[in-house]
Amino acid sequence: MINLNDIMETINMISEENLDIRTVTMGISLLDCADSDANRACEKVYNKITRLAGNLVEVVENIEKEYGIPIINKRISVTPIAMVAAASDGDPVMFAKALQRAADATGVNFIGGYSALVHKGFSAGDEALIRSIPEALSVTNNICSSVNIGSTKAGINMDAVKLMGKIVRETAEITADRDCIGCAKLVVFCNAVEDNPFMAGAFHGVGEPDCVIHVGVSGPGVVQAALKKCPNGSLGELADIIKRTAFKITRMGQLVGTEASKRLGVPFGIVDLSLAPTPAIGDSVAHILEEMGLETCGTHGTTAALAMLNDAVKKGGVMASSYVGGLSGAFIPVSEDAGMIAAAVSGDLSLSKLEAMTAVCSVGLDMIAIPGETPAEVISAIIADEAAIGMVNSKTTAVRVIPAINKKAGETLEFGGLLGSGPIMEVNLTKSPKKFIDRAGRIPAPMQSLKN
């Protein structure tokens, strides 16, 4: 039975507490677009995306108006392009440009999937695509890229880790005139998931249907507001409040996903319940942690508070939908979170503390600006450390760092919009991991992989 109080509470969440559907993402398989002729393949890619997603934006905007629910982004994820491009001998950047044409034609905010999965090694087309990433992200505006370099089952491909350190740095250099924006559209994963609707790491996995709709819900402000009403509650009481709030948020995502699926005539996939912050005041994961009792995000106790938050969000979400998936939990992107930005600027939040926090949150080191002088091998080592956390803990971890070319720690990168501004954080550059990174091969999978 619909309760009037629940309706009014949801209205208040939307109008006062920054509750929104962060994204409706259409996943599209491009496996049938592979062709020995790269030009034909690119034309097939463009035609299929525009055919299936041609009215995506219109449909989602109509749902937004009818239900009064803000839907911030309309996105597309596609099959990792390395798989499609492998059939031809053309320049992979041709596919990036075809995706950009499709983004322009459909009006979506982003297309994710300029990607390669190399956690156990490079197959045909993988290395060529990876080496093309800097150029591809430089000549396009709405294309996002990701590379999976490790998994619990496979271990960590350290050859790919070494290469990605160079690619991240090269991407920063080639887009230095735009505050290194290319790196904001590039993620390096361990244990990447196939149904993630959030950029920049979204791609359409090979186990997904030909076309599917995923929804990503966000509501840090709603959770913070709910906790404010219980200033002296026990941790158990706080966990219950978070679970109940996550349940309500997820139900809204389920409604939007189901409606979009019906109107677009494609299957509904998952609701990704992720507390994805924005630079707006009142929309911060860091401020939730502080509402739980921390004087500032980054102080001792932050990891424990984040672990509790992440767990409660998941528990509340899975009660609201049978199809919770993606990453689901709490994101901690520094530049996109007003509280994280403040903690980083004050020095209370360090890169080392962020790394510890990634062991218990949804993803990993996300949207972190680092000094422009940071060498490729240090970037590779940061990736390797984060991948090890994901591999050993059987969870998704990721690295999205932005080397701020010609800038130093303490300065700022300005991205604008949802990407916010990035305070450049200190990186330990006194000792080098180069010899370790230069060793070829793969870090073997841990004992946790032997579950059969």
Image (spheres, rainbow, N blue to C red):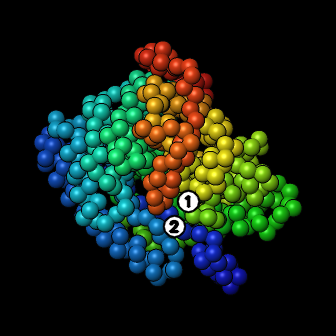
Question: Quick one: quadrant of the N terminus?
Answer: bottom right
Residue at which label 1 appears: 279
Residue at which label 2 appears: 21
Amino acid bearing label 2: Ile
Residue 351 percent across, percent down from the top left: 61, 37
Question: Position of 44 compared to 145: left or right?
Answer: left
Q: Residues within 10 Å of mark 1 (few under 14, many from 20)?
A: many
Residue located at (71% from left, 82% from top): 5
Residue 249 quadrant: bottom right
Amino acid bearing label 1: Pro
Question: Quick one: quadrant of the C terminus?
Answer: top right
Residue located at (56% from left, 32% from top): 427
Residue 317 visible within the image: no
Q: What mark, if any, has residue 229 been given in the picture?
A: none
Residue 180 quadrant: top left
Counting labels gives 2
Residue located at (16% from left, 35% from top): 89
Residue 275 percent across, percent down from the top left: 60, 57
